[in-house]
Amino acid sequence: MSATEFVTFGCRLNTYESEVMRSHAAKAGLQDAFVFNTCAVTIEATRQARQAIRHAHRERPDAKIIVTGCAAQTTPEMFAEMPEVSLVLGNEEKLQPHSWIPGANARVRVSEIMSLRKNNLHMIEGLTERTRAFVQVQNGCDHRCTFCIIPFGRGNSRSVEIAEAVEQVRRLVANGYSEVVLSGVDITSWGTDLEGAPKLGRLVACILRDVPDLKRLRLSSIDSIEADPELMEVLAFEHRLMSHIHLSLQSGDNMILKRMKRRHRREDSVAFCEALKARRPDMVFGADIIAGFPTETDEMFKNSLRIVDECGLTYLHVFPFSPRPETPAARMPQLDKGLIKERAGRLRTKGQERLTKFLNSSVGAIQHVLVETRNSGRNEQFATVRFAQSLSPGAIVKAQVMAASANYLEARLSA
């Protein structure tokens, strides 16, 4: 009988939760199955999941197919109608041990996600085939951006207590992980539902203080408008916190940001990057930007191009706008798909120019690299670094950058 195979789409949160499910499935004795942990952030993500399900069924027609994740939470009927699918689990149900007992559930088990008020951390010992560990410190979102369906897949914002987060990080470090990434749907909202409403900076400071053996800590995507003073302080002065921040930017135009129902203006993002860069010159920034949001004019789009330079962005994650059903943006005047594609291409070209410039500026530098495969890893600023020699995954090595290509650095070990 074949083993159970997990296929994970989307964010770091899903990666963490797939590890929780893997443990539950193993303890329940589940075999000969595929588990698809889906993403709903774009229509394309859902399409890819459906395609993968059909491919898995053709490959192993007798295997049980279980579908969960955000797409299963928001559109369970879509997957229930697929004859290949054996079981559909919601985002809450997938984390419960009893959901994985063979034959114990109805074919569709998806509860009302908005009713959840507490985020219980499900401890893991590590992540399969990964040298960097993710820790879920927050889930859900209280905001309602007009383009986003994720709150309906994840529910309202719920935070993990500091003691639980510290214990999970401590356990991962004890199991050999040198780097941990704090993850969530909206991690800068962490703490708003806890007693005293602590801010993210407090959580980060406590982890670094209470887990002294942790070598490297990273943050997943943050909303810079919610960055608290303690977070800014620890970002500026704690060098175990890596010098790479990914921003939930979405647009560089104030009118589009307003129509997206974002809480920041372009000036806020520029000021944040300038302030952090002034205090920590080695800091680099990435950002999510949506191309072709409804009503976006040429001048509005040019503001998104301009903000790449004004914020000094190095890594761009570009999303061509695709309307999600039931969201306000889907009811706004839509742009031509060809124009959206063209604008996304221009943003990606701009991003590639910025990345190439940054990589070229790194030649000659001495860096510390977390080895991810035998021949490559990531430096403190999240750039890919490749080596000619074979190394041990999971190790942090000192290296000198010898050359740069368009997308990665070439380095050799340094004494």
Image (cartoon, helix red, strand yellow):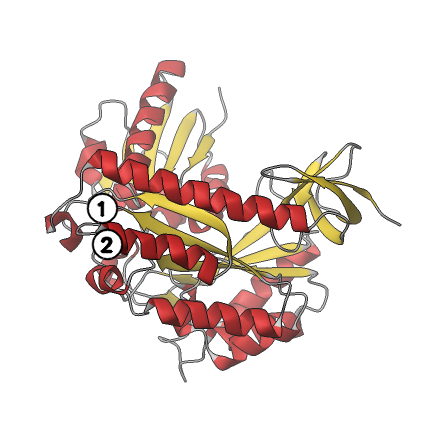
Label 1 amino acid? Thr
Q: Name the residue at 24% across, 42% down.
A: 322
Q: Which residue is mark 1?
A: 74
Is 323 on the left-hand or right-hand side of 281? left
Q: Nearer the viewer, residue 319 or 392?
A: 319
User: Residue 414, how many percent across, how many down?
Assistant: 85, 48
Q: Nearer the viewer, residue 94 or 1?
A: 94
Does dot 2 land on a helix, a strand or a loop? helix
The image quarter containing residue 47 is: top left
For label 1, the crowd category at 10 Å Cα-Cα, with few meaning under 14, some 14 to 19 and many 20 or more, is: many
How far is mark 1 from mark 2, CA to CA? 6 Å
User: Residue 394, how many percent across, how many down?
Assistant: 71, 45
Mark earlier in primary sequence (1, 2): 1
Residue 126 appears in the rendering:
no
Q: Name the residue at 29% across, 51% down.
A: 301
Q: Taking 261 as reference, is 73 above or below it?
A: above
Label 2 amino acid? Phe
The image quarter containing residue 46 is: top left
For label 2, the crowd category at 10 Å Cα-Cα, with few meaning under 14, some 14 to 19 and many 20 or more, is: some
Does dot 1 land on a helix, a strand or a loop? helix
Q: Which residue is mark 2?
A: 152
Is 372 on the left-hand or right-hand side of 143? right
Is 66 on the left-hand or right-hand side of 403? left
User: Which of the labelled discs sits on residue 249, or is there none?
Assistant: none
Q: Nearer the viewer, residue 177 or 283?
A: 283
Q: Are marks 1 and 2 in contact (CB under 8 Å)?
A: yes
Q: Taking 340 as reference, is 216 above or below it?
A: below
User: Residue 312, how many percent across, how many down?
Assistant: 51, 59
Is 296 on the left-hand or right-hand side of 307? left
Residue 387 appears in the rendering:
yes
Q: Nearer the viewer, residue 332 or 146?
A: 332
